[in-house]
Image: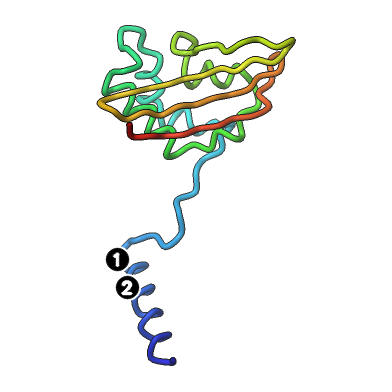
Amino acid sequence: MKTKMRVLTAVAMLMLASGCSVLPKEKLPAGDIDIYKLYASEIDILHNQSLRTDSKEKYEAAMTLYNNIDFSFVREVSTLEKIFGARDAHLGHRDHEKQNIIYVYRYKGKRVRFVFLRFNHAVVHSECTDKID
C-alpha cells in the first residue's frame, strides 16, 4: 500500500515539475476588465462584420473565449455587445421582458454556442456549449 502511494506521489510531482496542471485551468469571470486586453484580437475578430459566423477565424476566436472566460458572470447585455458585438446575435422569442440572446459559431462540423437569458437589460442566465456534429 505504501508503495502505491509513493508511486502516485512521484507521478504527481513529476507532472507538476514538467508543467502539467493537475487542476483544470481557472477561467476569468466575464465581468473582468482584463478580458478586453488579454483577448483583444479575438474580440476584434468577433466584431469583424466582413466575416461570417461559420468562418474558421470567428469559430476559433469564439472557442478561445469559451475555453478561457466564465460567462456565468455576465450581468449586463452591454457586456455581451462589448465581447461579441450585436451583428452575430440571434434573438429568441420575447416573453414579456425576457428574451434569449444566442451566438452560434460553426466551422467544419464543430460548433460553439452561447445562450444568454436577458430580463430587460440584465442577463439572468447563461449557457455555453461546444459540440462536434
Please tell me how crowded label 1 is: few (under 14), some (14-19), or many (20+) other residues with Cα within 10 Å: few
- Residue with the mark numbered 2: 14
Q: Residue at x 49, y 26 (%)?
A: 114
Residue, far bottom: 2
The image quarter containing residue 57 is top left
Residue, far front: 133
Colour basis:
rainbow
Relative horizontal placement of residue 59, taking residue 35 as reference (left or right): left
Question: Label 2 amino acid?
Answer: Leu
The image quarter containing residue 127 is top right
Disc 2 + disc 1, Cβ < 8 Å: yes
The image quarter containing residue 120 is top right
How far across and how far down the image is residue 33, in percent?
Answer: 54, 31
Q: Residue at x 59, y 31 (%)?
A: 31
Q: CA distance from mark 2 to mark 1?
A: 6 Å
The label on residue 18 is 1
Residue toward you, 107 or 47:
107
Residue toward you, 49 or 112:
112
Quarter of the picture holding the C terminus: top left
